[in-house]
Image (tube, helix red, strand yellow):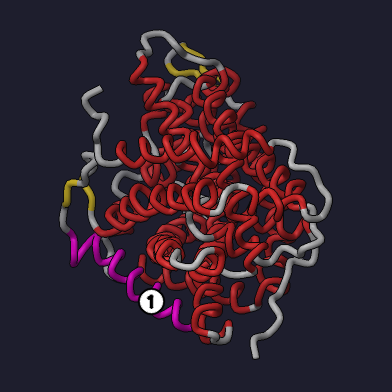
């Protein structure tokens, strides 16, 4: 006999857990770079519009599917419509691909946090520090395994004692750290040979639209970049929101919770830009904003902390502890999407599901680490990026599978079942669906078209523009 499914104790528990999933490395190291690259305020405006339309439609759909079926991503789609089990399989493969390399990167963050806490605050800024670490034989594996074990311990505790309890403690701390570092970043100034750069000047790079010289193809790139970022910001098309939605009680105001998640996630994404762009601009100028991903996090930002002098040691500790917390809140949501899928599909205990995924993630994480030394090779992806194991896994999961999951979800809800199935789930407690007409248009027409364009872009189809 199947046990009764656990639920979040309150709507705030669900909101904090969902927001914690979204406040991860993608927001911290990708959003600031895209904002600086794509016209500052122009990117922000496009991002906000898409968050309130495209992102809203997909987020609402996935959460409602989870609550309606009370199933994880692997089994939810087949429960919703016979013959659609395959979509659930793809939706489960996505987090299974992301989890191993996310733990490896989480291990990198842990290494830097330990370095700053231990007082070794100038070494992370040294030339070759990051490269020598990730290419080492053992150390990256050790940190990645520790990060994976921490994630598994939290998930093993369950929905209430693990995910919800952890999110209630960590998310307020994380938010305070993000706001505190952002305020400090705005207060910075630096005299570079008579040219004084300030944090407030750097803030203009984030919020003032830069339209000069932009063509129609450039606007398309901005739209596609903003839409791609929404997958990170809202944790959509990863199975996460379906899993979390399955733990939401039937008497909760679903639309109210979704609105809060939108506000929280978008606010933190913008705060990440306020936290990073002014500081990098002050000490490295506009050219410093060309870095993204690991290059921004593990090379550029440590140089910024070094340039701050002794205060950079303290800020470095706060920053990498904050990033470590953000990485953990995201990794637990990724793991939960997998563990809950195993539990629902194979009718096994949480303990056994955690153990199975731990072994799978451990093996793949070790392969990712070896990809920087023993198994190193270079492979050219369709989008022109030179890659190895981690980049290939990231490309397949983020650029191919996630758009496929999102597109097929729109087709299932928009045309096979009709949007009424989601609308009825959202409004069954008597709450109003304030953007109902917008939702129908987005899920049936606009979102599938945008997703198809995003899918084509990942193969470099528009590179000639």
434 or 421, nearer to the observer: 421
Q: Name the residue rendered at 33%, 75% in the picture.
A: 363
Q: Is residue 351 visible?
A: yes
In the image, residue 370 above or below residue 219: below
Extreme residue in the bottom direction:
1
Q: Position of residue 22 (x, y in %)?
A: 57, 50
Answer with left or right where residue 106 lies relative to residue 259: left
Q: Is residue 118 visible?
A: no
Answer with left or right where residue 454 lies relative to residue 330: left
**Quarter location, residue 349:** bottom right
Q: Position of residue 202 (x, y in %)?
A: 53, 22
For the C terminus, the image quarter is: top left
Determine if the magenta segment contains residue 402: no
Q: Position of residue 89 (x, y in %)?
A: 42, 67
**Quarter location, residue 260:** top right
Determine which residue is flagged by label 1.
Answer: 360
Q: Which residues are magenta?
A: 354-376
372 or 186, nearer to the observer: 372
Q: Circle 1 sits in a helix, a strand or a loop, which is it?
A: helix
Q: Name the residue rendered at 43%, 61% in the picture.
A: 87
In the image, residue 424 above or below residue 141: above
109 or 419, nearer to the observer: 419
């Amino acid at each position: 006999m199947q046990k009764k499914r656990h639920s979040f104790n309150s709507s705030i528990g669900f909101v904090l857990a969902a927001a914690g999933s979204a406040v991860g490395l993608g927001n911290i190291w990708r959003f600031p770079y895209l904002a600086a690259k794509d016209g500052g305020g122009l990117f922000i405006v496009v991002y906000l519009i898409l968050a309130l339309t495209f992102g809203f439609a997909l987020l609402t759909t996935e959460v409602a599917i989870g609550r309606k079926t009370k199933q994880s991503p692997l089994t939810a789609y087949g429960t919703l419509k016979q013959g659609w089990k395959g979509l659930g399989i793809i939706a489960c493969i996505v987090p299974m691909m992301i989890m191993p390399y996310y733990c490896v990167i989480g291990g990198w963050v842990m290494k830097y946090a330990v370095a700053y806490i231990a007082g070794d605050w100038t070494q992370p800024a040294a030339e070759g520090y990051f490269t020598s670490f990730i290419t080492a034989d053992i150390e990256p594996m050790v940190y990645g395994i520790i990060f994976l074990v921490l994630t598994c311990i939290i998930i093993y505790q369950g929905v209430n004692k693990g995910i919800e309890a952890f999110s209630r403690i960590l998310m307020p701390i994380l938010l305070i750290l993000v706001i505190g570092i952002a305020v400090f970043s705005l207060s910075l100034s630096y005299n570079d040979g008579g040219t004084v750069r300030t944090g407030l000047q750097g803030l203009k790079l984030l919020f003032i639209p830069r339209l000069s010289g932009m063509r129609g193809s450039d606007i398309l790139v901005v739209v596609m970049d903003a839409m791609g970022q929404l997958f990170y910001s809202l944790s959509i098309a990863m199975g996460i929101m379906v899993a979390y939605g399955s733990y939401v009680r039937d008497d909760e105001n679903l639309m109210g919770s979704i609105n809060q998640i939108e506000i929280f996630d978008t606010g933190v994404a913008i705060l990440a830009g306020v936290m990073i762009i002014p500081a990098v601009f002050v000490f490295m100028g506009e050219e410093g904003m060309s870095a993204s991903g690991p290059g921004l996090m593990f090379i550029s930002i440590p140089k910024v902390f070094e340039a701050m002098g002794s205060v950079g040691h303290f800020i470095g500790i706060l920053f990498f502890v904050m990033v470590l917390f953000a990485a953990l809140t995201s990794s637990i949501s990724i793991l939960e999407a997998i563990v809950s899928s195993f539990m629902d599909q194979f009718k096994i205990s949480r303990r056994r599901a955690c153990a199975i995924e731990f072994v799978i993630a451990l093996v793949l994480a070790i392969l990712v680490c070896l990809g920087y030394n023993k198994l190193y090779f270079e492979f050219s992806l369709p989008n022109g990026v030179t890659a190895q194991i981690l980049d290939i896994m990231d490309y397949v999961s983020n650029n191919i599978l996630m758009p496929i999951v999102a597109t097929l979800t729109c087709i299932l809800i928009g045309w096979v079942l009709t949007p009424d199935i989601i609308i009825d789930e959202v409004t069954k407690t008597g709450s109003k669906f304030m953007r109902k007409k917008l939702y129908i248009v987005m899920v049936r027409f606009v979102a599938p078209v945008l997703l198809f364009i995003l899918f084509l872009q990942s193969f470099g189809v528009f590179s000639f523009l």
